[in-house]
């Protein structure tokens, strides 16, 4: 479930599966894409803020194996990334808690990202026998520089909010108790400016990067397809189900 609420031109999209730490299943990817497209076309939406309910921002892709509810998806995960890349209005990510996988990489798609003090992020792709996604192989290098991006994407480490801000992935970090109030105050200030100016300026900021981001999205998904179901990925998923450390010897 994703809640969509509009106040004063700010559309807040809240990932609302707290019992699953707001993990994304295929339905969630599809719904977020639909809501982003709706926000782009809605003259009443001036700024979009994406956040999570409960103690997590998002635990990433749902590994529970729950089958999708539909068979006729228009967007799915790759399409969700595409519509965020092409979203013409300001897009803010407010990471209120832990973010794993796409719960971390989506910060690179934001125009501005904020984190609560207790929030922490991890890109566990190496530990899953997979590769990075959501354009992070491009956006993280651009935001953090190639060495920090490589460490974060290859090392499967947890980074706290202070480290993410220092690296350039988060614009600012706010105390947990006032986190959303501070984010919304920033969003209100942004939404007060003329929409044509915001859209034109964002378009110019994105112009040198949009094509490269779409290419990264395609190439990352091709790489994921090559690795998914491979020996390392199978061992990682088996270890996850058995609640043990994976054995990647000789892989």
Image (cartoon, helix red, strand yellow):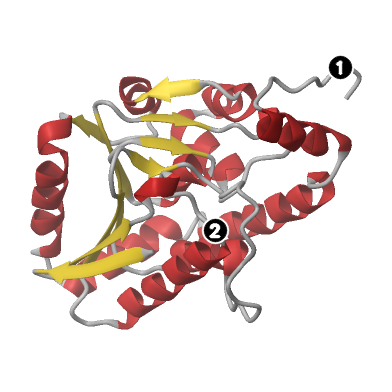
| Occupied quadrant, residue 250 | top right
Query: Residue at the front extreme?
Result: 242
- Residue 25 got which mark? 2
Against 224, residue 114 (above or below) is above
- Toward the viewer: 107 or 167? 107
Dot 1 crowding, Cα within 10 Å, few <14, some 14–19, many 20+: few
Rounded to the nearest whole Å, what is the CA distance between mark 2 and mark 1? 30 Å
* Whole-percent x, y for residue 55 in the image: 30, 37
In-front residue for pair 125/222 = 125
Q: Is residue 188 left or right of residue 242?
A: left
Depth check: give the residue in front, 33 or 53. 53
Q: Residue furthest right?
A: 250
Residue holding disc 1: 249
Please tell me in which quadrant of the rendered image residue 71 appears.
Answer: bottom right
Residue 50, how many percent across, how many down? Answer: 31, 55
Is residue 129 visible to the viewer in this orientation of the structure?
A: no
Is 214 left or right of 3, judged from the image as shown? right
Residue that appears at 51% across and 37% down: 140
Q: Going from the N terminus, do you reach mark 2 or mark 1 first? A: 2
Q: Nearer the viewer, residue 114 or 130?
A: 130
């Amino acid at each position: 479930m994703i809640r969509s609420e509009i106040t004063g031109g700010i559309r807040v999209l809240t990932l609302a599966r707290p019992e699953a730490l707001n993990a994304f299943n295929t339905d969630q990817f599809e719904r977020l894409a639909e809501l982003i497209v709706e926000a782009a076309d809605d003259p009443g939406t001036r700024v979009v803020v994406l956040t999570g309910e409960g103690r997590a921002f998002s635990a990433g892709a749902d590994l529970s194996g729950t089958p999708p509810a539909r068979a006729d998806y228009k967007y799915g995960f790759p399409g969700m990334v595409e519509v965020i890349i092409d979203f013409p209005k300001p897009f803010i990510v407010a990471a209120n808690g832990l973010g794993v996988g796409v719960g971390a990489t989506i910060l690179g798609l934001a125009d501005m990202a904020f984190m609560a003090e207790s929030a922490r992020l991890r890109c566990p792709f190496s530990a899953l026998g997979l590769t990075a996604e959501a354009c992070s192989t491009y956006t993280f290098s651009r935001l953090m520089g190639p060495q920090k991006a490589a460490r974060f994407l290859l090392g499967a480490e947890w980074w706290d909010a202070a480290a993410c801000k220092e690296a350039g992935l988060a614009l600012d970090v706010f105390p947990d108790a006032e986190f959303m109030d501070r984010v919304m105050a920033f969003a209100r200030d942004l939404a007060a400016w003329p929409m044509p100016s915001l859209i034109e300026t964002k378009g110019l900021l994105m112009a040198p990067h949009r094509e490269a981001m779409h290419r990264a999205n395609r190439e990352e998904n091709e790489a994921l397809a090559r690795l998914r179901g491979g020996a390392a990925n199978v061992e990682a998923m088996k270890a996850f189900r058995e609640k043990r450390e994976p054995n990647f010897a000789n892989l």
